[in-house]
Amino acid sequence: MDERLFIHCYYTVLSRREIAEYLRIPLERVKSYLDNRKMRITKEQKAAKTSRILSAKNQSNQFDDYIKENYLQMYINEIARKIGKSDTFVDNRMKKLGLVLPDEIRQKRIADTLFKKGQVSHNKGKKMAPEVYEKVKHTFFKKGIVPHNTYKNGHQVIRESHNRKYWMIKVPQHSSLQYKHLWLWRLHYGPIPKNHNVQFKDGDSLNCVIENLYLIDRKDQVIQNTLKLEAIAKRFLRMTDEEIAFAKKYAPGLLEAKAASVKIKYKLKQLKNDSKSSN
């Protein structure tokens, strides 16, 4: 009766093995008792039990001395193999103990893992062993097979790049998605010249119609971006985004006056440079 009472009290928090070890009875007896009476636990109870067991397993401090003695001389995976644990276990114990690799050792280890100039891969020119090939050949893609998650031609999605959103489209002859505005430009006007970008007239990167696109030299684009109202306010007036938004709403003339002043100075400088180069 004591064994049964103990099982009924603790089967939701202890594992079957822990119950068997505590009662000093065979594990199979515990399993049979629980299964015959259909004693089940909820998902939440199972998750809590698993978390507790893993936490106790991974917080073991019996390997700490070995880790402390060798972490500067040995790689994490080497220590893990020696103590029969995972790399993650060793890494977590090092964090728990506050063990940090000096920067020079860390950089050296990174450099040691990189291929050196002229270094040849150990398996270069070697063919896969026949028995290995037979074992894994069923995982190879057959010629002409298309992955199940491949986008169909014409499929469009929105992706973010450099804090701006763009339309991407799957087009024929391309396995990866293409920027829609670049594809549209090439479709209407041909290849994009070197050092040129396709931009949006209204500034909306999601307004992907050919009438809203224009071609600009990258040098001119840099100048154009530098002379934007927001850029001038940040660079010359040291204003934050919130301050710029406030000024735009309540005193737009002040920002426009400063922008006009900067543009005039820039234009005069450009004219001087042009006159010097002509002379």
Image (cartoon, helix red, strand yellow):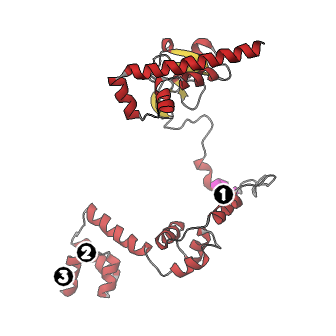
Foreground: disc 1 or disc 2: 2
Mark pair 2, 3: CA separation? 10 Å
Is 129 located above or below residue 251 in the figure? below
Mark pair 3, 1: CA separation? 54 Å
**Label pair 2/3, CB-CB below 8 angstroms:** no
Residue 133 lies in the magenta-colored region: yes
Residue 97 lies in the magenta-colored region: no
Residue 151 in sight in this render: no
Residue 219 in sight in this render: yes
Secondary structure beneath label 2: loop
Foreground: disc 3 or disc 1: 3
Looking at the image, tell me whether mark 1 or mark 2 is earlier in sequence order: 2
Secondary structure beneath label 1: helix
> In the rendered image, which residue does mark 2 sit on?
11
Instruction: Name the one closer to the observer, 220 or 24.
Output: 220
Tell me residue 124's x, y (percent). 77, 53
Looking at the image, tell me whether mark 2 or mark 3 is earlier in sequence order: 3
User: Badge 3 local density, few (<14 within 10 Å), some, or many (20+)?
Assistant: few
Secondary structure beneath label 3: helix
Tell me residue 232's x, y (percent). 50, 27
> In the rendered image, which residue does mark 3 sit on?
5
> In the rendered image, which residue does mark 1 sit on?
132
Q: How many marks?
A: 3
Provide the residue span drawn in magenta.
Answer: 130-134
